[in-house]
Image (spheres, coloured by chain):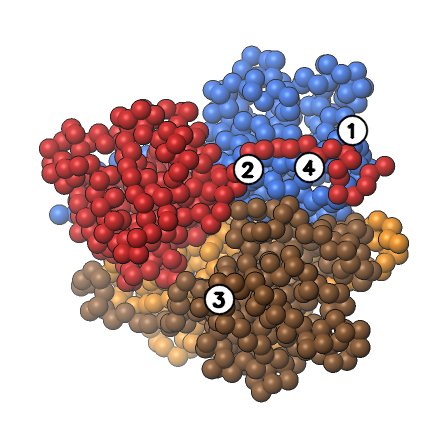
Chain colours: A brown, B blue, C red, D orange
Amino acid sequence: MIRVTVWNEFVHERQHEEIRELYPDGIHACIAAGLEELDSGQELEIRTATLDQPEHGLTDEVLGSTDVLLWWGHCAHDQVGDAVVEKVVHRVHQGMGLLVLHSGHFSKPFKRLMGTPCALKWREAGERERLWVVNPGHPIAQGIGRCIELPHTEMYGEPFSIPEPEEQVFISWFEGGEVFRSGNCWHRGNGRIFYFRPGHETYPIYHNPEIRRVLHNAVRYLAPNTWWSDITSAPNVPRDQAPEPLK
Amino acid sequence: MIRVTVWNEFVHERQHEEIRELYPDGIHACIAAGLEELDSGQELEIRTATLDQPEHGLTDEVLGSTDVLLWWGHCAHDQVGDAVVEKVVHRVHQGMGLLVLHSGHFSKPFKRLMGTPCALKWREAGERERLWVVNPGHPIAQGIGRCIELPHTEMYGEPFSIPEPEEQVFISWFEGGEVFRSGNCWHRGNGRIFYFRPGHETYPIYHNPEIRRVLHNAVRYLAPNTWWSDITSAPNVPRDQAPEPLK
Amino acid sequence: MIRVTVWNEFVHERQHEEIRELYPDGIHACIAAGLEELDSGQELEIRTATLDQPEHGLTDEVLGSTDVLLWWGHCAHDQVGDAVVEKVVHRVHQGMGLLVLHSGHFSKPFKRLMGTPCALKWREAGERERLWVVNPGHPIAQGIGRCIELPHTEMYGEPFSIPEPEEQVFISWFEGGEVFRSGNCWHRGNGRIFYFRPGHETYPIYHNPEIRRVLHNAVRYLAPNTWWSDITSAPNVPRDQAPEPLK
Amino acid sequence: MIRVTVWNEFVHERQHEEIRELYPDGIHACIAAGLEELDSGQELEIRTATLDQPEHGLTDEVLGSTDVLLWWGHCAHDQVGDAVVEKVVHRVHQGMGLLVLHSGHFSKPFKRLMGTPCALKWREAGERERLWVVNPGHPIAQGIGRCIELPHTEMYGEPFSIPEPEEQVFISWFEGGEVFRSGNCWHRGNGRIFYFRPGHETYPIYHNPEIRRVLHNAVRYLAPNTWWSDITSAPNVPRDQAPEPLK
């Protein structure tokens, strides 16, 4: 059983009528429904959490029972408390998978784990995007053809100031002429991280069956095999417990 | 002083009138002229070599005095002798830089060093290409703006079956809708390798000032700091020469 | 079901009495027995192949039904036919996992996939080795404590001329004063490769329960999720099939 | 000219007589003298900064004119102000090299850039360490033989919870039986980072000629080729400035 928590700042959906129409119960609810839909093997145990809840819904109990965390944020990154961010980061180090979505590139946990600015350029013009699979053998690309075509998206363009990805799954082509590294994997400590670009709030991205397939694949890929619980410990090894006797 | 050898199979230019018009003395001569042109600091010592020469122009003496080798090949990959390939590969392991150009993705030395098929898809339609700089701080991107625009090129599309690049410098956008990892760096042994996509023989790519800038930057980047001459040796360390005394 | 083939050159065991005593049916049989022993979930289907068989036991039928190949070789690397090597390499590109054992660092398939000399230094003095787990969260390290201690081994020392590992699992300490990167992971195409150092023929390494545990973990880790069958294809995309209409 | 700033918390040397004897003017002064000593080409412009100075000696003016920063800290990591840390990190992103020394593994800038705990285990027993060169072609290893031997050091042992190094230069062997990844390179943004293990305050490590050679090599290796000044900017590209016209 993979225990999944879908986190969303849940602000736009309450402020803008047209976004509420796309995501009446919030982006998190739509993502959760998409995961549920594909969970034919009943492997997933899914819940959601939002910014406005106590501790943003990410209490020790919730984080302590989360295997994979999805993160959607955009206009309220700075309202996420640093203590919660540190707990998220610590849980990733121990093994929790983190799936960072779209404008989450500027979220505190992602920047904190990458160690870089994670900046990019952008344009809102409802243009066409094509996400090409650059690694057809990767678990996250299973069930996807040569590319995913999205008729209307926000554009993100290079340079994307991230550490060189350990594995790349998708690179995007945009109608307006740009490219972007859209699906990238890293490890940090014992946790896996996947950044996935699409997901702008003004388009029905999370209703798209191929996007849902990628999210479902990613959750399974990110699920930890094991936990490295004491990853922050820095124990002293006393002289008389050295593996080789020391004089 | 950086000792540069520009290798070219030099076949198309002798068979096709329109290619000869673009490259009357061969692609190698044009590339060499481009490097010369930018060598205001007189750092480079440039010569050329071609398939039809004895040992393809890559004798022990030539390879032994080459710091950076450029490789252009397309229709005659299989005419390159395996013994020469092994010598090139060995020299890369010791420290020689290798700049693989365009259709050289299928050359024997490149496939041998990558360990993968290096396949891709392609289209000849004279379409527009835009090479985006994804790492503006990289030495190879110096003097280049946000992107290089080529009005007419052959298209190369993903998936490109290479090992994950250690550093990426360029990703291409194509008018026809594809993307491609166009500028990628790897190490093999003590040598650096840079693959650079543009360069189709039917377009005046190597006359383009920005392409020439990239080649010049790349040659300087690939030049070895030092040589690891005995990289293939596998010496026995006798028991009595162990750093720690063994009983 | 993971279909495993254990390949062994099977020469030493027939030439040296003391090695035959350790491995009466060959190293391959001992490794196969070790995998069997731990296969409580009955996930593995194990067979063996040896150098002296037709096509070294690696016919198209055998390779075509192998998910993970283990490779032990030492004194007969150059007797392995190049055509078989290319088939092994091609199968790895498509997705087959490859577990390279001990002196297999100089085997043709491993060098071919790494693209580097894979040289190292060595000493036969029966000294103590301690393989430290540098990544306790890695699937290959599960069930292993902080380190594996081997009372008597052949020493392998740095520099080991391999490409920088994508993931490291073990680094060895030797009584005589050297260190070695003993457990390293790479991808080549769609296949995973794990090199694991211990395994000298004159010591009962493959009878050791912790070594058997590592091999069992590695086989499960290397098993492909999926196959990239057409990884070598380089298709033309005709102009009129470009994703975006071209004039 | 490479502008170097050697930063030191400068606490132990003022509190412990035996440490003051080794480093009467502080570890920073000894390191600076070591760099000076090897600067026969007069490439370096060296200054120092310490915790007790205003802004820890790292004012905008100082950081803005630093190409490579060395960082030694141990018992006062948490006294380094977060604002200064962010400025250091930002300068690294733009291109400044960072050389993290010994117990600096737990410094704020290093942990912030790595995104991982950077924990390790340790022992103070004055034991022997041997730093093996695993990449003899690396610029940082030039002028060093097969290994550096230190007669008395503090031990650091694996697992070291860092991201997988992009390049490794040294791995340590310890008399007491452990190993450690002692010299590792990463990029973060446009800046290079090198972590170098030796340097415990109770031993005369920074007086050792080989250690001084490594530091000098590292400073030259870390010096930026170029600056990526606007790495944090996330510009909007208006619709009418898209490279391709959008309807």
Q: Are marks 1 and 4 in contact (CB under 8 Å)?
A: no
Q: Residue drawn at (77%, 20%), measured in percent from left and top?
A: B19
Quadrant (top left/top right/bottom left/bottom right) for the N terminus of chain B = top right
Frontmost of labels 2 and 3 is: 3
Circle number at residue D120: none
Task: Report the Cα–Cα distance between label 4 and label 3.
Answer: 41 Å
Give the number of the disc on residue C231: 2
Q: Secondary structure at mark 1?
A: loop
Rendered location of residue B103, percent (x, y): 65, 30
Q: On the image, numbered disc 4 is attached to which residue? A: B156
Q: Nearer the viewer, mark 4 or mark 3?
A: 3
* Amino acid type for the residue under numbered disc 3: Gln
Horizontal side, residue A200 vs residue D135: left or right: right
Image coords of residue D20 (percent x, y): 38, 72
Q: Nearer the viewer, mark 2 or mark 4?
A: 2
Spatial CA distance of label 2 from label 4 is 15 Å
Of mark 1 and mark 4, the one earlier in the sequence is 4
Chain bearing tag 3 is: A
Q: Nearer the viewer, mark 3 or mark 1?
A: 3
Q: Give the chain of mark 4.
A: B
Badge 1: chain ID: B
Residue B61 visible in the current orientation = no
Task: Tell me the kind of residue under disc 4.
Answer: Tyr
Q: Nearer the viewer, mark 1 or mark 4?
A: 4
- Residue of label 3: A42
Query: Are dots 4 and 3 on a single chain?
Result: no
Label 2 marks a residue whose chain is C
Dot 3: within a 10 Å radius of its alpha carbon, few (fewer than 14), some, or many (20 or more) residues? Answer: few
* Residue pointed to by mark 1: B203
Mark 2 residue crowding within 10 angstroms, few (<14) / some (14–19) / many (20+): many
Residue found farthest to the front: A40
